[in-house]
Image: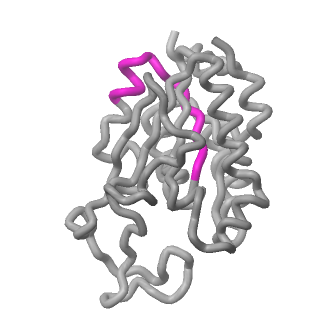
Amino acid sequence: MARISRLNPKLPGQTTGLIMFDALNGYLHPADPKKVQFLAERNILPNMQRLLAGARNAGMTTFYPSGAHAEDGSDVVARLTDTDMDLGPGGSADKPIVPRFHRGGKDAEIAPEIAPVKGDYVVPKHRWNSFFQTDLDLQLRVRGIDTIIICGGSTDVGIASTVFAARDLDYGIVVVKDCCYSARGNNNEFFMERVFPRMGRVMTVDQTVALMHA
């Protein structure tokens, strides 16, 4: 039965879960005007709202893997990298990559436009991969969920890491391309066109919602 379910092109509410990855104020309501414009041009937040509304109409549970980093950096391991997160200078011993938002701050709160309701599940996480040392896999499996729909950002960081993990955990995967984003060159397009299609299905919001049903 499980294998048949994963081959069902439809997205039934009882066996499909919506993953709103890092749907946080700091990312969806950034202070940088250029980032505000970037998100607005792509209609990211309204698209996420439409996707969430469709999932709720179908009776899906929504999961919110959200960065919950300690302000003192005690849950972060510094390492050498060639660049900073935006592919600029950085990553050296005196300037390692560190989380931008911390647990308890307003930026780390879920954006109010897509906030959880009763029955949804918030997953505190400390790494890019939403499954790594969290109970997301458990919470999906106890509900009989074998397929995930994922959206959020950044595509080339947490979305990619989570999708790779979901694939290895044998979940069916739908990546909603107009609800995902990355401001790093053509990284978003690369993953949507060259990587994710081999791991699951890549769809628009409209295509995804059209397949949802109770």
In which image quadrant can residue 50 be found? top right
Using the image, determine if residue 16 lies above or below residue 157.
above
Q: Nearer the viewer, residue 138 or 205?
A: 205
100 inside magenta stretch: no
Q: Which residue lies furthest to the left in this view?
A: 74
In which image quadrant can residue 49 be found? top right
Whether residue 108 sits left or right of residue 185 in the image: it is left
142 inside magenta stretch: yes
Which residue is at a point 73% across and 48% down the rendered structure image?
178
Q: Where is residue 75 in the image (x, y as percent from the top left)?
A: 24, 62
Magenta part of the protein: which range? 138-152
Which residue is at a point 47% across and 34% down the rendered structure image?
63
Total marks shown come to 0
Using the image, determine if residue 123 lies above or below residue 40.
above
The colour scheme is: one colour
Which residue is at a point 39% across and 54% down the rendered structure image?
67
Q: Where is residue 56 in the image (x, y as percent from the top left)?
A: 60, 23
Q: Where is residue 201 in the image (x, y as percent from the top left)?
A: 68, 37
Q: Position of residue 8 (x, y in %)?
A: 66, 17
Instruction: Point out the image quarter for the C terminus.
Output: top right
Using the image, determine if residue 62 lies above or below residue 134.
above
Whether residue 92 sits left or right of residue 133 in the image: it is right
